[in-house]
């Protein structure tokens, strides 16, 4: 059994199709098929059933997936340890961040990281706060960046910046000229809000509690996972939303939006945090990014 065979097996299992897996791995279809056949023959086990033009995991194949992933994870970690023995920080960092952090705060940090350590490969994917924490916990991400609180208490969490939510509406909205907004105003207009599991939604729900409002009392006609889509919808109609001031920032003048800091209740402030797993080896690449974060501390508070 080789690492390449395991990579091919997992990619075919993920795609459910030999040709698509071969394309993603930059291999020929025959090479992928031969690798699977060799793996099955060597261990006298059937991992896939051929179904029409596709391919489906057998029960043995499904049971093998966690072990195959664990071996590849250990191989990747061994490579990172060897990279750490080099005189220069090398390797890769798999980062995952919640939408607001990934779109509006993290990019300059990653640019600074690349300028300081050009031989470290960075990959960034997005998810909401809950999925980012889960990725770090499972090991599918080396580090995570989230807004607000997390429920996974097994992770190390370090605050790296601060943020706040603001009330957003179209410039011609009846409330746009107000300096203070009341509980009745919240109940009088429709809302478009972020999805459950996002840090923005969690902080918004906490703000509603401060206002003495049960979320079920709001007239919410749309939940969306995209800040940009929400802002476009808000600019086009009479709805309200509450989003990060960073998300509204540059969009407000261009999209005819009005953003109001909360002065009628406790400001819905929150932290941006970096998440790491305390039980996993901390590579020099991770240490380098943490040092970059430390160098930016206090610049955005």
Image (cartoon, rainbow, N blue to C red):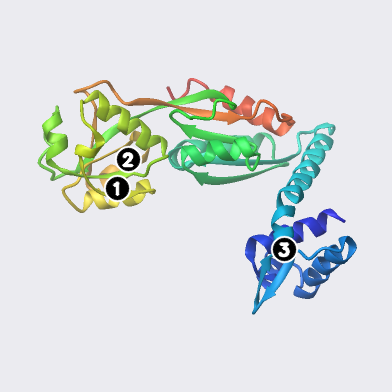
Horizontally, residue 134 falls left or right of residue 222, namely: right
Residue 258 spot, x, y in % from top left: 21, 39
In front of the other: 35 or 84: 35
SS assignment at label 1 = helix
Question: Residue 80: which numbered mark, if any?
Answer: none
Q: From the viewer's side, name the closer residue of 218 and 42.
A: 42
Residue 216, compared with residue 39, is above or below; it is above
Residue drawn at (48%, 30%), measured in percent from left and top?
150
Left or right of 117, for residue 158:
left
Contact (Cβ within 8 Å) of mark 3 with mark 1: no
Cα gap from disc 2 to disc 3, whole angstroms: 39 Å
Q: Position of residue 31 (x, y in %)?
A: 81, 71
Neighbour tally class for label 2: few under 14, some 14-19, many 20 plus, Cα within 10 Å: many
Give whichever of discs 2 and 3 has the lower sequence position: 3
**Residue 248: mark:** 2
Mark 1 residue crowding within 10 angstroms, few (<14) / some (14–19) / many (20+): many
Residue 152, image x and y in percent?
54, 30
**Callout 2–callout 3 Cβ contact below 8 Å:** no
Q: Residue at x 39, y 26 (%)?
A: 270
Task: Please identify the quarter of the rendering in which residue 60 is found.
Answer: bottom right
Instruction: Name the residue carrying label 3.
Output: 25
Q: Which residue is mark 1?
A: 231
CB contact under 8 Å: marks 2 and 1: yes
């Amino acid at each position: 059994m080789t690492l390449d065979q395991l990579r091919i097996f997992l990619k075919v299992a993920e795609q459910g199709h030999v040709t698509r897996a071969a394309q993603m791995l930059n291999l020929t279809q025959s090479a992928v098929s031969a690798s699977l056949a060799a793996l099955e023959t060597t261990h006298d086990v059937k991992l896939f059933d051929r179904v029409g033009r596709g391919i489906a995991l057998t029960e043995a194949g499904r049971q093998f997936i966690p072990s195959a992933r664990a071996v590849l994870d250990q191989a990747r970690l061994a490579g990172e340890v060897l990279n750490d023995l080099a005189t220069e920080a090398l390797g890769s960092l798999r980062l995952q961040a919640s939408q607001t952090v990934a779109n509006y705060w993290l990019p300059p940090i990653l640019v600074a990281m690349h300028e300081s350590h050009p031989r470290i490969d960075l990959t960034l994917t997005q998810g909401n706060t809950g999925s980012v924490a889960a990725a770090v916990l499972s090991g599918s991400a080396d580090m995570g960046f989230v807004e607000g609180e997390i429920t996974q208490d097994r992770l190390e969490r370090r605050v790296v910046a601060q943020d706040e939510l603001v009330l957003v509406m179209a410039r011609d909205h009846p409330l746009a000229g107000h300096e203070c907004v009341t509980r009745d105003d919240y109940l009088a207009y429709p809302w478009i809000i972020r999805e459950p599991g996002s840090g923005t939604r969690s902080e918004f729900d906490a703000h509603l509690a401060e206002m003495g409002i049960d979320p079920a009392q709001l007239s919410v006609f749309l939940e969306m996972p995209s800040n940009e889509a929400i802002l476009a919808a808000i600019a086009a109609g009479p709805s309200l939303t509450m989003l990060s001031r960073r998300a509204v920032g540059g969009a407000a003048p261009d999209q005819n939006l009005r953003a109001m800091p909360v002065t009628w209740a406790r400001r819905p402030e929150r932290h941006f945090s970096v998440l790491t797993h305390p039980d996993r080896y901390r590579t020099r690449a991770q240490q380098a990014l943490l040092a970059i974060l430390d160098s930016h501390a206090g610049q955005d508070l």
